[in-house]
Image (cartoon, helix red, strand yellow):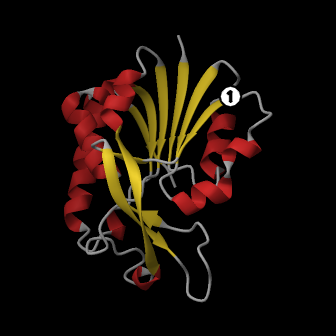
Amino acid sequence: MKKILLDLGTHFGQGLNQFINILKIDDSWDIYSFEANPVTFKMFNGTDIYKNSIFNIQFLNQAVSTKDGKTIINVETPPNEGETGMGSSIIPLSDWNPWNDSLRQNFKSKYEIESINFSEFVKSLGEAEIFCKMDIEGAEFDVLEKMINDNSISSIKEIWIEFHENFFSNPEPYKKRKYKILEELANNNISYSEWH
């Protein structure tokens, strides 16, 4: 059976390299690498880095979401620096409060980007052993809840998730949502780990 790695939030490839080693990925696997931040995507330029490798990777500058279309991404730009490919999120800044408001003023740039309905994308992969690393800066709550509700989560064999409940202005509801999501993953026999 085909094996697939879905790397959601590739950034500069740190997690991608880690999971290539953890899962002992070779040329029989398919890898889909999603990075929503257009600045990071351009700086990383994974297509050049992996151009002559054995790996079958598609690099996609899209936001993982609950719907297809366009969305706005807020991109962090540190003071006295140009755009560096740092933090970004599709969560509105009225709700997004990383590091207890110490970074909010750094989110100066906005871009309109493509988003994908991740549930439908997973369903389109057909029968395969699918492994997923998810680091999508707050969007994990809506995406995972939709996958649980439409049962696309059942296609995932193992998932590593970085939750960002403490990055929201009001973290308490997100803490409850996190525990409910983890409970549902366990109930559906989905192997999961929290990833940092």
Q: Who's the residue at 46% across and 65% down the image? A: 88
Quarter of the rendering containing residue 24? top right
Q: Does residue 87 appear left or right of residue 29 in this picture? A: left
Question: Disc 1 marks which amino acid?
Answer: Lys
Q: Position of residue 144 (x, y in %)?
A: 30, 42
Residue 56 relative to residue 194: left or right: right
Q: Is residue 43 above or below residue 6?
A: below
Q: Nearer the viewer, residue 175 or 42?
A: 42
Q: Describe residue 17's horizontal placement relative to residue 40 as left or right.
A: right
Q: Secondary structure at mark 1?
A: loop
Query: In which quadrant of the rendered view does residue 184 lie?
Result: top left
- The residue most toward the top is 1
Foreground residue among 154 and 68 = 68
Residue at the image position 76 percent from the left and 37 percent from the top: 51
Q: Which residue is mark 1?
A: 24
The residue at 34%/50% (across/down) is 140
Number of numbered discs: 1
Which quarter of the picture shows residue 16? Answer: top right
Residue 5 percent coordinates (x, y): 54, 31
Identify the residue at image location x=35%, y=75%.
Answer: 97
- The percent position of residue 44, horizontal first and vertical second, equals 66, 55
The correct choice, above or below, for 138 with respect to 186 in the image is below
Residue 73 picture location, percent across and down: 40, 63
Q: Residues within 10 Å of mark 1 (few under 14, many from 20)?
A: few
Give the residue at the far bottom of this rendering. Answer: 80
